[in-house]
């Protein structure tokens, strides 16, 4: 069996080896689709709605954000180096009695210079719509319409601004922003832009981090320092507000805490932010607990956090140890056990000899077969790492399949009622292999595990 896997690896490596710059670009783009831990989002069409207080107690500032990739819209070739997509962004707002309050449409145009970018799933476009609503209940509809294909993508949001200022203390939905201002998402407004100075925060070279949802449980996946911004309303005037923040692990042990006391002379609204650095924690699930208290009332709120490994930890050098471990997937058990019994120096020499005997170009120092194997190991260690268990990427199910078979010809994300990305299907058609590997995301493990193969 291991001999068969090695032959598969050998054959697939040579089919996948790039012969020119075009194939190199195709491989990089295919691999980047798997690099889910190098970006904050993995949804191809994502939207969020945030609510903020204004200076008027019965009015609220709302911010709708939407992001989508090139692959969802149709590009028309204008020349060999120019492809253009045209689309329309439409928003509609109804009150709770379904009376039309406002509607607007805005046409946009995007251009790229090469065909590969027209199908890219890693090039995002980000837009936001800011507007003001009074106390009440509403329905907000957003539609993205491709003007060439006439196909549409839609989002619906139920907005409840009814009882916010009736509570003694009320938390609005927080906004989580990447603290690194060097990598802006460049959100572009559509519609009449609000003059509220609060909106400057989201245009000032910051990334909005959207929550993920697994089985109806929302959590924020974080790997770099973030700013956690939230607004709080208290009905009592001339009263201070004491805030206690705690981050606890899955055993409810406190791993971080901070306290703040906010003073107000007349306003009922408090705006506060804290910075959280995931690098101070071990990878895994945590809960951010917030306790707010004044002289007459108190309220609790909490949010799930999912701390990922830092890039420095993920980009481990492919040392002799890293090379030896994954070799169990391609060599016979007897050979692997013999290598395991050797000293470190003897094992390194034996591994060199093993690859030299299989060098596709004998007598030369270059060994494309070994180089491709090491590239796959590095890629697995970078992208398929377990977010909870202390495992390297090559030790995960997806790391194993990637090392043996290389990049998939196609990656599918079947929709389900619980999550758009609960399942992931890798399809291989090289050498008439015609195999499918179905993975399911296990939150308790922090990784995709192999469900079955076809």
Image (cartoon, rainbow, N blue to C red):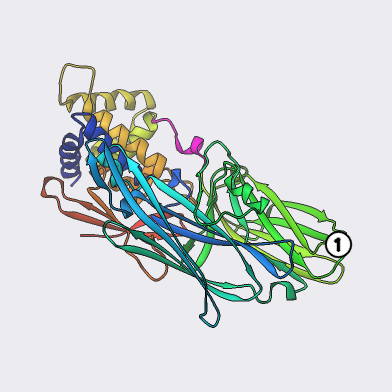
Q: Nearer the viewer, residue 394 or 345?
A: 394
Residue at image coords 42%, 69% = 418
- Quick one: which residue is furthest to the bottom in this view? 97
**Magenta range:** 310-318
Could you tell me residue 136's position as x and y percent? Answer: 63, 76
Residue at image coords 33%, 25% = 348
Could you tell me residue 98's position as x and y percent? Answer: 51, 80
Q: Nearer the viewer, residue 225 or 126?
A: 126
Is 305 placed left or right of 22 in the picture?
A: right
Could you tell me residue 369's position as x and y percent? Answer: 22, 30
Asked whether residue 421 appears in the rendered view, the answer is: yes
Q: Nearer the viewer, residue 111 or 323?
A: 111
Q: Secondary structure at mark 1?
A: loop
Is 166 placed left or right of 358 in the picture?
A: right
Residue at image coords 47%, 59% = 47
Say whether residue 420 is magenta: no
- Quick one: which residue is furthest to the left in this view? 432
Quarter where residue 196 is shown: bottom right
Task: Give the answer, above or below, for where 366 lies relative to 325.
Answer: above
Asked whether residue 30 appears in the rendered view, the answer is: no
Residue, disc 1: 266
């Amino acid at each position: 069996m291991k001999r068969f896997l090695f032959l598969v690896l050998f054959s697939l490596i040579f089919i996948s080896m790039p012969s020119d710059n075009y194939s190199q670009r195709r491989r990089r783009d295919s691999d980047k689709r798997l690099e889910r831990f190098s970006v904050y989002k993995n949804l191809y069409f994502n939207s969020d709605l945030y609510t903020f207080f204004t200076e008027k107690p019965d009015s609220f500032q709302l911010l709708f954000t939407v992001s989508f990739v090139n692959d969802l819209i149709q590009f028309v070739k204008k020349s060999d180096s120019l492809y253009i997509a045209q689309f329309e962004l439409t928003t509609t707002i109804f009150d709770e009695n379904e009376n039309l309050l406002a509607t607007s449409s805005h046409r946009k145009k995007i251009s790229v210079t090469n065909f590969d970018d027209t199908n890219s799933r890693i090039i995002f476009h980000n837009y936001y719509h800011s507007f003001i609503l009074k106390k009440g209940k509403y329905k907000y509809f957003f539609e993205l319409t491709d003007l060439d294909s006439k196909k549409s993508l839609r989002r619906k949001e139920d907005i409840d601004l009814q009882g916010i200022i009736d509570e003694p203390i009320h938390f609005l939905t927080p906004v989580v922003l990447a603290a690194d201002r060097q990598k802006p998402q460049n959100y572009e407004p559509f519609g009449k832009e609000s003059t509220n100075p609060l909106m400057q925060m989201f245009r000032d070279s910051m990334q909005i981090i959207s929550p993920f949802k697994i089985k109806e449980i929302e959590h924020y996946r974080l790997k770099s320092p973030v700013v956690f911004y939230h607004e709080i309303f208290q009905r009592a005037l001339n009263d201070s507000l004491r805030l206690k923040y705690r981050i606890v692990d899955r055993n409810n042990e406190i791993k971080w805490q901070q306290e703040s006391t906010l003073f107000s002379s007349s306003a009922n609204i408090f705006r506060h932010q804290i910075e959280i650095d995931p690098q101070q924690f071990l990878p895994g699930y945590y809960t951010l607990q917030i306790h707010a208290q004044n002289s007459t009332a108190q309220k609790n709120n909490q949010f799930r956090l999912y701390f990922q490994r830092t890039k420095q930890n993920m980009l481990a050098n492919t040392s002799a140890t890293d090379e030896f471990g994954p070799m169990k997937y391609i060599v016979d058990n007897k050979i692997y056990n013999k290598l395991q019994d050797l000293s470190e120096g003897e094992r390194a020499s034996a591994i060199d000899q093993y690859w030299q005997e299989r060098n596709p170009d004998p007598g030369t120092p270059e060994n494309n077969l070994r180089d491709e194997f090491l590239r796959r190991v590095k890629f697995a260690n970078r992208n398929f790492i377990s977010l909870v268990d202390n495992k390297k990427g090559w030790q995960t199910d997806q790391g194993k399949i990637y090392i043996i078979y290389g990049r998939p010809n196609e990656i599918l994300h079947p929709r389900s009622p619980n999550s758009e990305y609960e399942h992931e299907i890798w399809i291989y058609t090289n050498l008439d292999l015609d195999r499918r590997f179905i993975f399911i995301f296990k939150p308790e493990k922090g990784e995709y595990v192999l469900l079955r193969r076809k």
